[in-house]
Amino acid sequence: KAAGRNTYALFGEHMDELLRKRRALENDLRSAVETRIQFETFYQPVFAANSGALCSLEALARWNHPTLGYISPDQFIPLAEEIGLISDIGAFVLEDACRTLAELPDISVAVNASTLELESPGYALRVLTALAKWQVSPARLEIEMTETATADDRGELERTISMLRAAGVSFAIDDFGTGYSSFSRVQKIEVDRIKIDKSFVDEMHRSDSRALVVAMIDMARAKGLKITAEGVETVEQRAALESLGCDDLQGFLLSRPLPRQAVVALVTGAKQT
Ligand code: C2E
Ligand code: CA
Ligand code: CA
Ligand code: CA
């Protein structure tokens, strides 16, 4: 009994500690959003599977915390969604992406958007305003969204997508295959591309995972969608995905996400040679 009570006390303490850390991180995130300067955007190059040419960049948010260093977006994006700061962070990334698009005229850029952002009424206008400000064609921007079933306002999400697609912006379903509704969602929402999630690429040496990848590619082909595979880490994965007919490949084997300056140098340098 005593041991049970101790465990409970320990658990309680542990919870306090976690809550305290979380609140501290929340406060830090709030002030980081106010000052902006701790946020950076990294860019991961995406390559055409058959030619190997660099064809686009994925913009990825980075939070450089003053004492904790770089914090993964997997940690701070969900927190930002919870405390209502996701639109601000999305706006920083979008602004940086447009600046990069203006600087690199031959390349397209993809940004990630949370379902919460896509459902907020001002989103489409904000995207079009940023593109206009930097005089960038909407056709060079792609928006990656996850397939999380949306809670309430499906209508707003669909309005946002059709307004932006009418202007020339394209859409991709990110982490394709990980949601329970992947295949049905793609029937309902007009998109241009699927991104096969890294978890499937990781397991491609197994025949059942490989079969799933084949099914995703067949479905995408039948619907005329482009296909990107993410998280490509080995030459075996690259060869398999290329032979199965993926259009584009992204992963540490090809390039890690890079700071803006490094990617600009890479792209402009690559063009000269
Ligand atoms: P995601 O959209 O699936 O992005 C791909 C993630 O996989 C990135 O992590 C990227 O660095 C990583 N990655 C790419 N290739 C490889 C590989 O070969 N091996 C391994 N191990 N990892 C690879 P990152 O940058 O940490 O982003 C994590 C997630 O955070 C993203 O997943 C995306 O869902 C979210 N995120 C990032 N930036 C933003 C943003 O600006 N807005 C929103 N709403 N979400 C974002
Ligand atoms: Ca993505
Ligand atoms: Ca993913
Ligand atoms: Ca993701």
Image (spheres, helix red, strand yellow):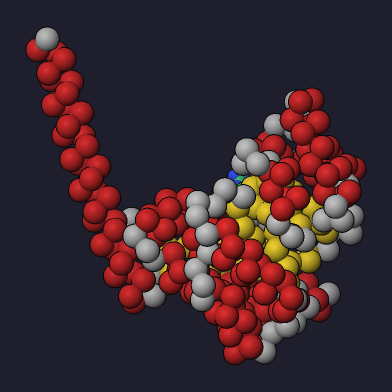
Looking at the image, can residue 54 be seen? yes
Residue 177: image location, x then y, percent? 68, 41
Residue 128: image location, x then y, percent? 62, 81
At horizontal 17% and vertical 32% (from top left) the residue drawn is: 12
Query: Which residue is at the front of the view, 240 or 131?
Result: 131
Looking at the image, can residue 64 be seen? no
Residue 66: image location, x then y, percent? 32, 64
For residue 18, side relative to residue 246 (left or right): left
Q: Residue furthest top?
A: 1
Quadrant in which residue 11 is drawn: top left
Quadrant in which residue 210 is drawn: top right
For residue 81, side relative to residue 17 (left or right): right
Above or below: residue 178 compared with residue 63:
above
At horizontal 29% and vertical 56% (from top left) the residue drawn is: 25
For residue 59, side relative to residue 65 (left or right): right
Query: Which residue is at the front of the view, 26 or 87?
Result: 87
Quarter of the image with the C terminus in it: bottom right
Quarter of the image with the N terminus in it: top left
Query: Which residue is at the front of the view, 125 or 263?
Result: 125
At horizontal 33% and vertical 75% (from top left) the residue drawn is: 34
Residue 121: image location, x then y, percent? 51, 72
